[in-house]
Amino acid sequence: MASAPEFQHTLSKAAGFSGMSLHTGEKVSLKLHPAPANHGIKFKRKDLPDEPTIDAKIDNLKMVERATTIGEGSIRVHTVEHVLAALSAMGVDNAIVEMDANEPPIGDGSAKAYVDVIKRAGVSAQEAPRKFFHVREPMHIETKTGAMLVLLPDSNGLRISCTQAGPNNRFTQFMSTDIEPELFEREIAPARTFVYYEEVESLMEKNLIKGGSLENAVVVRGDAVLSKEPLRFQDEFVRHKILDIVGDLALVGCRIRGHLIAVKPGHAANAELARAIAKEQSRRDTLAVPRVVPKGNGGLDSEEIMQILPHRYPFLMVDRIISFDESGTKCIGVKSVTINEPFFQGHFPGHPVMPGVMQVEAMAQVASLLLFKLAKTTSRIGYFMSADDVKFRKPVMPGDTMFIHAELTKARGERLAKAKCHCVVNDAIVSEGELMFTFLDR
């Protein structure tokens, strides 16, 4: 039985606070506003003409040195990771972050003030279901600075296991935690940003911490910790690293379900993983399986297919075309896989599995039918030239009905064409690839 969908949340009302900017040292204010479903998180610059907004998406990432900066055009918002971490971890999917400067107030260098604002405003459910990225296969990021992130499947939610180590492995710390509202509020949000003393001069020269002080950061000098107050946790540094990870990964724009193992993470590595997740999510969206046949022109039955393709039994791998989309660049074919297929006699006898090469051939035949439909001619023969990025994800068995999707992605004159294809069984992609063809006169 399928589990009930989880629904998006927004704020129940607006709430805000004021504080100092890390970049300029000037007093700034922030207000969080509710937003409709599927709005996402947007930052609004009230201090600029027309009050422009910036989507908190990885595509808008501009800089990751010591903090995360997003922007569109010439508009920038600096140090967004703490407010994004609070919104994400506290369950807010849609909100407008309104500011009168180019940066949220830094507060005490943690996310506690943002969590307090969210709790003061309250959170309410919306009718639209949440968007999730379910980790299916391990994802790995490694940088020249020694950061390593490995994202593993975990259906329970987001868990982060993080190891933080400073220069010469000073203050090496480890923590593993689920990212849930109550845990985040209690164990992660209060952890403050920190900096090593030897980095301060360089950061000051780059105008990255003009408003920095012992009131909003912990300074590490040698084996000593300089702070206005004692450390809030014995392992406060690794907790803040987890806070930054949550904020940076919020730029993906959907909830992540997986277990992240992070070693010496930083904003650059976090952003690289966010990009990889967003790219994979985009690929999945592109290959998304429609649960109903899309509207479009009529298809082709087996007789019409054989008038176009030269293939015959046992090498005709498509039974019919069920639709062409209205643009004419996509089509869907069907192949009913039966135990009587001749290849089952010799391919894994006793455990019949459709050969991957036959799935590629089925994709090639459907793509050829699409291309002939576009060319409006049957006077040529299409020859399969190459296959790139071919992947076989699940076995195809006797009794399966395979839906074969083809989309024209590139055409060079009347001789060369490229199509992106994938096969689907029971709402799951079983194989995919990008195929190239050439067309010659019969």
Image (tube, rainbow, N blue to C red):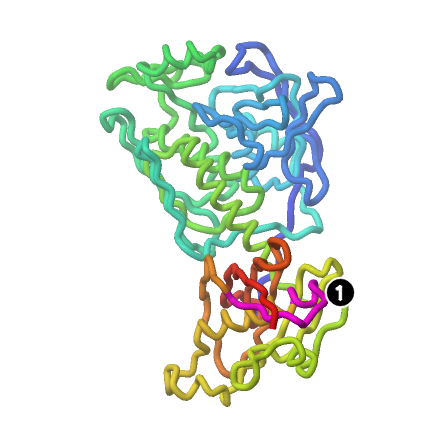
Task: Confirm whether the magenta stretch covers residue 380.
Answer: yes
Task: Confirm whether the magenta stretch covers residue 383.
Answer: yes
- Residue at (56% x, 49% y) in the render: 282
Image coordinates for residue 250, horizontal then vertical, percent: 53, 38
- Please, is residue 369 above or below residue 75 in the view? below
The crowd level at tag 1 (other Cα within 10 Å; few <14, some 14-19, many 20+) is few
- Residue at (31% x, 14% y) in the render: 198
From the viewer's perspective, is 297 left or right of 252?
right
Camera-nearest residue between 115 and 317: 317
Q: Secondary structure at mark 1?
A: loop
Image coordinates for residue 39, horizontal then vertical, percent: 68, 40
- Report the quarter where the C terminus lies: bottom right
Camera-nearest residue between 242 and 14: 242
- Residue at (56% x, 28% y) in the render: 70
- Report the quarter where the N terminus lies: bottom right
From the viewer's perspective, is 244 left or right of 164?
right
Image coordinates for residue 167, horizontal then vertical, percent: 26, 24
Camera-nearest residue between 55 and 355: 355
- Please, is residue 90 above or below residue 414 in the view? above
- Please, is residue 206 above or below residue 389 in the view? above
Label tally: 1
Q: Residue furthest front?
A: 441
Which residues lie in the magenta part? 370-384
Image coordinates for residue 122, horizontal then vertical, percent: 65, 36
Residue matched to label 1 = 295
Tag 1: amino acid: Lys
- Residue at (60% x, 55% y) in the render: 286
From the viewer's perspective, is 139 left or right of 304?
left
Camera-nearest residue between 113 and 414: 414
